[in-house]
Image (cartoon, grey):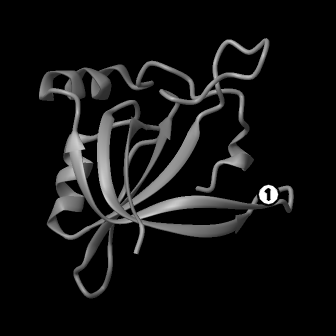
Amino acid sequence: MAHISISGKVIKEPELRTFDSGSQTVSLSVVDREYVRPAKGQEEAPGQFYDIDVWGKYAEICVDRLNKGSRIAATGQAVWQEYTTKSGEKRRVLKITNPSVTFLDTKAEAESLRGGGSGGSDFGSTGQDEIPF
């Protein structure tokens, strides 16, 4: 079983899903550009994207605490998942299951993201059809 630790920014507002059984889950998508070298002539690297699934009461806490642009660190089991883009291309994403999530923003910083809406940065020139959500 492979484990991974990542840190980055949440790239869309987390949404809590509740199932008929009462179980709750939230899927977070995170971009990491910190250690990605930009191509020659580019100012910024496209980033590496990770999906993180959080279950149970902790999912509810994540929805209350995280916003688009929030910084987090996560450690968990790494699983490759394949998907097809709208244009028909097959892609793979690294999904982190059973994670331990650490909030890297203070509550005040998280509240300012909630009030500001955008979360600061746009997340690169990759089109929405390239991101698996």
Residue drawn where x is 67% and y is 22% of the image:
38
Residue type indicated by callout 1: Lys
From what the image shows, is residue 6 above or below residue 45? below
Left or right of residue 109: residue 19: right
List x then y, in percent, for residue 119.
Answer: 41, 25
Residue indicated by mark 1: 86
Q: Secondary structure at mark 1?
A: loop
Residue drawn where x is 65% and y is 31% of the image:
46
List x then y, in percent, for residue 73.
Answer: 30, 42
Left or right of residue 12: residue 101: left
Residue drawn where x is 50% and y is 20% of the image:
121
Left or right of residue 129: residue 5: left
Structural crowding at the residue carrying mark 1, measured as other residues with C-alpha within 10 Å and reported as few (<14), some (14–19) or many (≥20): few
- Front residue of 22 and 95: 95
- Front residue of 68 and 100: 100
Residue drawn where x is 64% and y is 48% of the image:
131
